[in-house]
Image: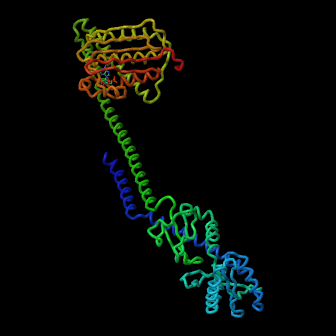
Amino acid sequence: MILALFLPVAALITAQLSRLYYYQQTKPVHAVINQQLQQVIKMVEYQVRLERDRLAVDLASAIAPADLENPGEIRSRLDRAVASRTFADLAVFYSPQTGPIMAFNPAAAQDRSEEQEQDSEVIAGSLKATYDAFLRILREGEESGRYKATEDVLVVLKRDRNQYNTVHYVAVKDAAKHTVGVLGFTLDRTYVREKLLPNAYRTIPAEEREKSLMDYVVVGVQSRETGDFLWSSEPFDWTQGDSQQRPRADARKLFDSALNFNFLLVKLKDKSIEQISREFWISNLVLVLGLAVVMFGGLLFTWRSVNREMELARLKSDFVSNVSHELKTPLALIRMFAETLELGRVRSAEKAQEYYTVMRRESERLTGLINNLLDFSRIEAGAKQYKFEPTSLPELVEQTLENYRYHLEEKGFKLEEKIDRELPEVAVDREAYSLCLLNLLDNAVKYSGDSRYVAVRLARENGSAKLEVEDRGIGIQRKDQEHIFEKFYRAGDPLVHNTKGSGLGLSLVQHVAQAHHGTVAVDSAPGQGSKFTLRVPIDDATRN
Ligand code: ADP
């Protein structure tokens, strides 16, 4: 049975543990977190691109509608547009009809005008060379709805100092909303750092943030050329990585578009992936072990109650054989003496009288036994009804002893009686109370060993009527004392097993005591004898 119960649980727990071990080896947590970090990167990239597109469309609409017949108008609009926007470093409008028209941001120009001019030459050159392709890409983009007529297809501005910048392209419309030219511009680095990146980060929709690890990471941008950290979503020291080339980030990626030539960095704020993975592992281990403890606890409980049931089944079968044995003996005696009398084989009248007495006594024993059985079965069925009535306990006890005295004397017992006649009336069920006393006396006699002593005392104590039945018999071991009030229980002592009994007597006494809101207790030591004490409260208003 132990195997049947414990094996499946052990198997389950082993399986869980080996699974955990497998997890520990394959590090799925790492993979999941990495995936999440990539997700964060994608989100930031996308938002940056949206922000850039917004700027590009804003700049393009400032010079639209472009009238190619009037390049002067385009130039002045372009100048104004660039001058009034801090984000554009320089801008070049190009259409085959007008050729390149350039504008520089005066605020940014001061010491960089030469560079700016070089740059715009490069942009103008590339526009001229690939204008048709640009136009096609921008139109396709617009038609597909994928991007709002902006692109950053071509990128590189190669300068003397080997620097790079991203050029952003946007279609320019005429009055009829036809694309008639392309505008290329570069973004001001300060603007990117101070406005574009913070704006993009701030405008990530709340639901996207919640779905992702966004709130648990720091996002940063690092220039690929210089290694400078341009921006960080919150103050963070990125430099503590292995080197400038490998900053302190859990994930790193070159921007896809809009800000090419910059790295996007992501770092988990409070914990490293290692830590999270370890915590995941530990918390799972704790969970599995906790579960194991609970399961084994449950099993232990099941095992114990199954054991108890089995023990009860054994006690019941003992009970049946004990009771039938106990019924058989008086019946056999009665039958034997009745037959003797019937056949007229009794010579003297005294002998006949003696036989009658035996028959009466044995039938009394039978009645007592059957009363016990009936009471017990009523109690078990929950149908036992007690009839409480004001009773003089001294009288009831004396009367019961009187009926029993014969048994005692016959067996040579000395009865010590001490009854407090001053005891007030107590509401008890007379029959049940006297049955208790009889059961206790019966036990005292049955388990008397070699002693021939029984004491019955009735007294008042702390508002209770206290009835004591004491013997100097075989006594009861401590481990049995806990159980003797349970139904069918009989002590393992061989002395007990040689004595007839059903194991019901004391459980009845206890039931009666409880029904009277009283208690029954035992005080005993093996070889020293036993004292049973039945207490019933004298003034008990709760009893009906
Ligand atoms: P029974 O006497 O029919 O076995 P009881 O319920 O009356 O059943 O008693 C339960 C057990 O308690 C007995 O089997 C015996 O082991 C123990 N016991 C009861 N009374 C005494 C006593 N006076 N002295 C020693 N053992 C006792």
Q: Is residue 287 above or below residue 342?
A: below
Quarter-of-image position of residue 161: bottom right
Residue 206 position within the rendered picture, expressed as x and y whole percent measured from the top left: 62, 63
Looking at this rendering, what residue extends furthest in the bottom direction?
97
- Residue 253 locus on image (x, y percent): 51, 73
Say left or right for 375 vs 233. left
Quarter of the picture holding the N terminus: top left
Residue 397 rendering spot, x and y as whole percentages = 40, 11
| Front-most of residues 416 and 210 | 210
**Residue 167 occupies quadrant:** bottom right
**Residue 52 placement: quadrant:** bottom right
As drawn, 455 above or below 243: above
The quadrant of the picture showing ligand 1 is top left
Q: Residue 238 or 530: which is nearer the viewer?
A: 238
Please indicate whether residue 141 sits to the left or right of residue 213 in the image.
right
Left or right of 268, for residue 447: left
Q: Give the colour scheme shown.
A: rainbow
Work out whether residue 327 can be spotted: no
Asked if residue 418 can be seen in this view, the reply is yes
Q: Residue at x 47, y 73 (%)?
A: 245
Residue 88 in the image, given as x and y percentages of width and height: 67, 78
